[in-house]
Image: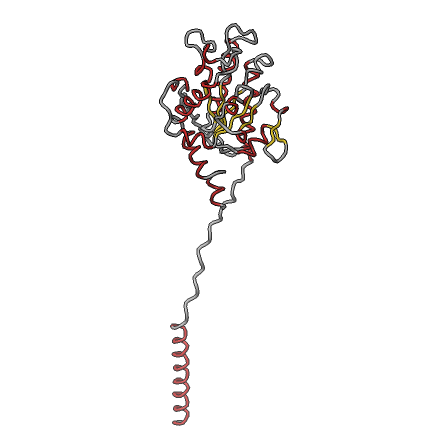
């Protein structure tokens, strides 16, 4: 009897212990994981047709104010001016091209034959017909400029053009010559000299017609607005102030070609004029660095 009681108590203790263990496991059980909140759906992008795209505001373009080049001074202002202090610099690399009037610079010894690109009957319309020989074969006017590459080129034609062109055609074709020479010798300062006057009694043409041609040329040259290209009013240097014809003492005897003293007067006026322009520094730079600064650096 006693033995059975002990067995029952032991069984109860075992059951109690098992229940305690079961409760302990239940109390220390890891709580279940929480589920994340549902993610809201991202709306699909709306794709518009190209025609539905909102239009950009038009680009506002502010027009530039028209820029007019400053008017150039007339070289006639320098007639009778004092000799330029830069005369030797200008003369050191001066070449002259053109017709028989231009050839007077060589004829009277102001330039040597190596810098002469002038002869009788030359004009704008027949410029390609004439050649020159500097000891390396015949070359045309453009080839001569390319060979010499002068710092300063005095170009004088026109007397043989006044009966071949209108003033507008003359200026237009003259510009083509200028631009071609500028391309051949870009550092050269080009002087477009006006056609000089004649006696009123000379029936070759009229001074009124010559002035029309000169005005058209001046306007064309100034329209380039190029510091390497300048119009020179040679007409006014040798004309009579009252009649505007060739002054009598400036004639070589035929009422058309110029007397010897005229050539120095032309150069004196031209050099004084160049002193007032950017051309002076361009010429000076070219004399220091022939072919330009870039050519000097490559040496």
In the image, what residue occupies the spot 45% across and 30% down? 91
Name the colouring of the figure.
Answer: secondary structure
Q: In the rendering, at what x and y percent does residue 144 appear?
A: 57, 31
Instruction: From the viewer's side, name the closer residue of 33 and 77.
Output: 77
Instruction: From the viewer's side, name the closer residue of 61 and 53.
Output: 61
Q: In the rendering, at what x and y percent does residue 149 appear?
A: 52, 33
| Residue at far left of view | 82
Q: How many marks?
A: 0
Q: Is residue 3 above or below residue 251?
A: below
In the image, what residue occupies the spot 46% across and 52% down? 39
- Residue 106 located left or right of residue 67: right
**Quadrant in the picture for residue 181:** top right
Which quadrant would the N terminus be assigned to in this image? bottom left
**Quadrant in the picture for residue 165:** top right
Q: In the rendering, at what x and y percent does residue 86 appear?
A: 39, 30
In the image, what residue occupies the spot 45% across and 60% down? 35
Instruction: From the viewer's side, name the closer residue of 172 and 93.
Output: 93
Instruction: From the viewer's side, name the closer residue of 158 and 246.
Output: 246
Q: In the rendering, at what x and y percent does residue 77 appear?
A: 38, 18
């Amino acid at each position: 009897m006693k033995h059975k009681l002990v067995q029952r108590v032991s069984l109860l203790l075992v059951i109690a212990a098992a229940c305690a263990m079961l409760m302990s496991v239940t109390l220390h059980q890891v709580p279940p994981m929480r589920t994340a909140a549902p993610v809201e759906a991202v709306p699909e992008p709306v794709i518009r047709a190209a025609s539905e795209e909102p239009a950009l505001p038009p680009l506002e373009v502010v027009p530039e104010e028209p820029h007019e080049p400053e008017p150039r001074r007339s070289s006639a202002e320098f007639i009778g001016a004092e000799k330029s202090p830069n005369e030797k610099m200008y003369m050191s690399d001066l070449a002259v091209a053109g017709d028989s009037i231009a050839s007077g610079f060589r004829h009277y010894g102001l330039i040597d034959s190596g810098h002469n690109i002038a002869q009788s009957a030359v004009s704008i319309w027949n410029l390609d017909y004439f050649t020159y020989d500097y000891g390396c074969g015949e070359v045309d006017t453009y080839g001569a400029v390319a060979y010499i590459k002068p710092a300063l080129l005095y170009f004088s034609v026109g007397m043989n053009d006044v009966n071949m062109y209108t003033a507008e055609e003359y200026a237009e074709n003259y510009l083509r010559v200028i631009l071609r020479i500028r391309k051949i010798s870009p550092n050269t300062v080009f002087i477009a000299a006006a056609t000089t006057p004649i006696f009123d009694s000379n029936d070759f043409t009229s001074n009124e017609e010559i002035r029309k041609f000169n005005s058209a040329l001046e306007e064309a040259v100034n329209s380039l607005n190029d510091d390497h290209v300048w119009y020179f009013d040679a007409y006014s240097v040798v004309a009579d102030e009252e009649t505007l014809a060739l002054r009598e003492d400036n004639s070589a005897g035929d009422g058309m070609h110029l007397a010897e003293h005229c050539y120095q007067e032309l150069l004196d006026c031209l050099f004084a004029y160049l002193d007032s322009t950017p051309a002076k520094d361009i010429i000076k730079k070219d004399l220091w660095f022939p072919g330009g600064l870039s050519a000097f650096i490559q040496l």
